[in-house]
Structure formats: C-alpha cells, structure tokens
Amino acid sequence: MARIAVTGDDAVALAAKAVNPDVVAAYPITPQTIIVERFADFVADGEVDTEFITVESEHSAMSACVGASSAGARVFTSSASAGLMLMYEIIFIAASSRTPIVMAIANRAISGPINIHGEMTDQMLFRDSGWISLFSEDNQEAHDQTIMAFKIGEHPDVLLPVAIGLDGFILSHAIEGIEAVSREEALKFIGGERTAELKLDTKDPISIGLLHLQDYYMEARAQIRDAQERSRQIIVEVFNEWEKLTGRKYKPVESYMMDDAEYAFITMGSSAGNARTTVDELRAKGEKVGLIKIRVYRPFFGDEITKLCTNLKGIITIERAHSFGGPGGIFSTDIKSALFNTGLSPNVAEYTIGLGGRDTLIKDYHNMYYRAKDAFNEGKNLPIYWWGLRE
Amino acid sequence: MPALPNEVSDDDFKTWVKEKWGYKKLPMAGSTPPGSSRFFRTGDWAAKQPKLNADNCISCLKCYFFCPDSAITMKPGNDGKLRPEFDYFYCKGCGVCSNECPGRKGEKAIYMEDL
C-alpha cells in the first residue's frame, strides 16, 4: 500500500470510495463538507457506482439513508454538529429500523454561540440511540474505521448503524500520511454486496418500523439492547481481521505504557496523540504514567478499562466535551460507574479541554498531570475542571 | 435470533398476537408480515366498550358510518330492523358511536361500559 498525504476528510472519502456504497445521501456541513464534496467528485467522475442523493437537509439525508438501507442497500453518510441535531429524530429511527448505515462525523462544537471547530459533544450526545460509536485518533484510523464500520454494522448479529468520529479541523482538515486501502481489499474484507435478510422487497412484502405502544415497545427496544451487547464480540473480531489484512492493530480500549503505570491519562480521539507524547516526555523524567485510549465509546467497554486500572493510584480523564449539570465528565462518569462495579477506587481527576476547538498543548497535559498527581498524593479526587478557561 | 416476518404465516401471526410474543421471538425492527393488521387486536387498547340497548335503536346507521375502525356491522334483528354489532377484536373503545347515537326520545341506544 502506497502512502499518500491527505486530510482526515479525504481519508474518509477515500474509504467510502473503496467501499463503493450503493447509496450516499448527505448534506454538507463544516468541517465534514470535504467528505461529501470529494464523494460527489467520485460520482461525477464515474469512479463509484453509488446513487448520490442530494437532499435539502440532514433530516432528509438520514431519512433517505434509512429508506435505502431498509431496501437492502449499503449506505454511507456524513455530518457534524448542527447537521446531526437536525437529523436527530431519524438517528434513533436508523437504530430501531436496524439499518447498518455508516456515518462519518467530523466532530464539531454545537451552537451556541455558533462555532465550527472541534468538539466531541455532538457524537457523544446520541450515545443512547443504539448506534455503535467509534472515535479516531488520526487520519489513518478515520480511514480504516470507516471501512471496518460496514463490516461491524452489517454483521447479522449486530445490524446497527455505526458512527465514526474524527475531530473537526484537528483531523478533518489536517494533512497526514495514510495508507489507503484499495477497493479490491475493502470489498474482500466486508463482502462485495450487502446481504440483507430483513429488507423491503415488493416481491416479498413486509412492514418495517410499525407503531409499538405499551404492548410491544419494550420488546423492540430490548432487541437493540441485545444487538449492542452482541456487537462487543463482533467489533473485536473485525478489528482482529483488519490487523491480518493491514497489520494495523485496533482494540476497543487501547493502552500505552500501562504495564508498571501508577497513573494514567484516559482520553478519546485526537487528544490521545498529545497524551501519548506527554507520557513519553513524563516517562523520560521517571514518572510512572501511561495512557488508556477509548476507541469504542458505545458499546462501552468498561471491563477492559477497569482491568487496566487495577494497579493505578490515580486516573486523569481528559475529554473534549461537557455535560452541563452532570456528575462529572461524560465518559469519566461511565468510567467511575464501571469502577464502582469492580470495587476499585483509584483517585480520579477530571478535565474538560478544548471546547470549540481551543488548543490544548503538550505543556497543558504536563500541567494537568502534575496538578492531578499532587492531589492524588494527598488522597484527593479533583472534580471536573475546565482546562484553559479564562476567569 | 428472531424469525423474518415473511416467514410468519397468518396462523403464526394470530398466535403471536394472542400470546404477545417476547423480544426473543419477535422479528426485529418492528417488522411484520404484510396485511397483518387484520389480525392485530387493537381491542386491547380499549378502556371502555360500547354496548347496545336495542330498545332505543332507531336503525339510523350513524354509528356504522362514524366508527373510525369499521368495527361496527349492521345486522337485522328478529323484527328485521338493522342493529349495530360491535367487533371487540378491533374496537378501541373511542366512544364516537355512543356520542353520535341519537337514540330514541333522548335515551341512547349505545352506551359505554368500563372494562
């Protein structure tokens, strides 16, 4: 595989081109626009066989995706921030209709005040929808995960839509070297055609997505619950197969320098890159610190995280998102909950960083680390703190 | 894994509705075989059901025309006059028939009874 230099959005568009989906219905929104623009180029140039549906809004985009996927098509779309907000109703219907749509999200802050830059809250917001939700650290991961998402979502034990996050601008507009997967490899990996057992077919009609009231709604929702649970194993299997194909190793929860660590950063997406460099620099100074990276946000792999926390004195959660009035950070609340079930009680310091794309530099990670470590040495937890906020 | 809806026969579907299948047995995505609403007991939704006091019925057919679920059929009684018959399998107990019923001399022929 030849290395090419592309933006994160280009990396995702190239992945979609390799997959050659039956239908793409999408509406442009910064910082995802390049994905849709590039894909429109591929359609115009005859490089894909995709039916590209130009819609008038994101609500229509996701509706068209659900319709196409219900008819058995392999479907891709892309959005961000306010666009996601507009398709919100149909995001949940995509999950309940069991349509394995793949959506790349160039994670962007939510209005208001209006802002176009990076933040993960947009994708974390629909964690309760039934979608499988993954985040990317770099452009290669965004590329790879877009292809893997089809295989995960379309697995007969799963049949759920999959969202792939890449940090707005930080990844979506930054050029990095990636190894692009060819169409031949991609289709060999996920299968040339989607085989949908449950589909709308005029020759063999069924009804999908009917009214479910008090009598059947809980049963329908329980099926989504179980599909999410089954997806845990499928995700791991697909990651392992990907490693065989490309040599690139993926795990739902990844660790770096954790073997003898006493403290750990826990983060998600591109922040893991800064955290990794910080770990290297702190290790050079003799600090026993490691990194836990959450790749798969839903389903939440709590056991895998807590296993890594067994010998830790303290954990430092860093997330580019915030829940107003919440009991802490968004995923750090999940982590604390998972720890409760194990009886482990490392000290916890929680940080919200970089909302609306504000830079959080390596030196900030150093400072966040020492601030947390000082508290841990006194046996204290640090409640959620907005790093870099002016008073 | 649940069956596919197009593998569910009419008789299976009647059992499904009667037994109220659980999530392990139901097809996914809220899907059903075609035309299955014929077998769906919307009568389960009712909190009240219409009853007939035949003495007050003037066979005006208003209930028949107003019923939103076509759950009323008109059948001739012993005197040959048409009277409403309620299909409680579909009747959701909305009470429109009773509301519209003019009755005889201000006394309704259709009244709603609590379930």
Image: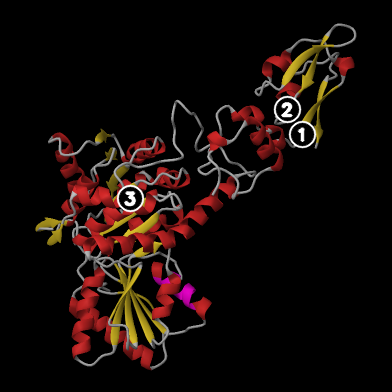
How many marks are shown on the rendered structure? 3
Main SS type for the magenta part? helix
Q: Which residue is mark 3?
A: A150
Badge 2 vs badge 1, beta-carbon distance below 8 Å: yes
Q: The residue tagged with tag 3: helix, strand or loop?
A: helix
- Give the CA separation, mark 3 to mark 1: 49 Å
Whether A269 is among the magenta residues is no
Q: Which residue is mark 1?
A: B48
* Residue type, label 1: Lys
Q: Is residue A263 above or below residue B4?
A: below
For discs 3 and 2, the disc positioned in front in the rendered view: 3
* Residue type, label 3: Phe
| Residue A264, picture quadrant | bottom left
Residue interval drawn in magenta: A332-339
* Residue type, label 2: Gly
Residue displayed at 32% across by 89% down = A260
Query: In this view, which residue lies farthest toward the top?
Result: B80
Q: Residues within 10 Å of mark 1 (few under 14, many from 20)?
A: some
For discs 3 and 1, the disc positioned in front in the rendered view: 3
**What percent of the width, then of the height, locates residue B58?**
82, 10
Q: The residue tagged with tag 2: helix, strand or loop?
A: loop
Q: Is residue A60 above or below residue A390?
A: above
Q: Are marks 3 and 2 on the same chain?
A: no
Q: Which mark is residue B95?
A: 2
Instruction: Give whichever of B74, A366 is nearer the camera.
Output: B74
- Give the CA separation, mark 3 to mark 2: 50 Å
Q: Residues within 10 Å of mark 2 (few under 14, many from 20)?
A: many
**What percent of the width, then of the height, locates residue B73?**
74, 16
Left or right: A122 in relation to A182:
right
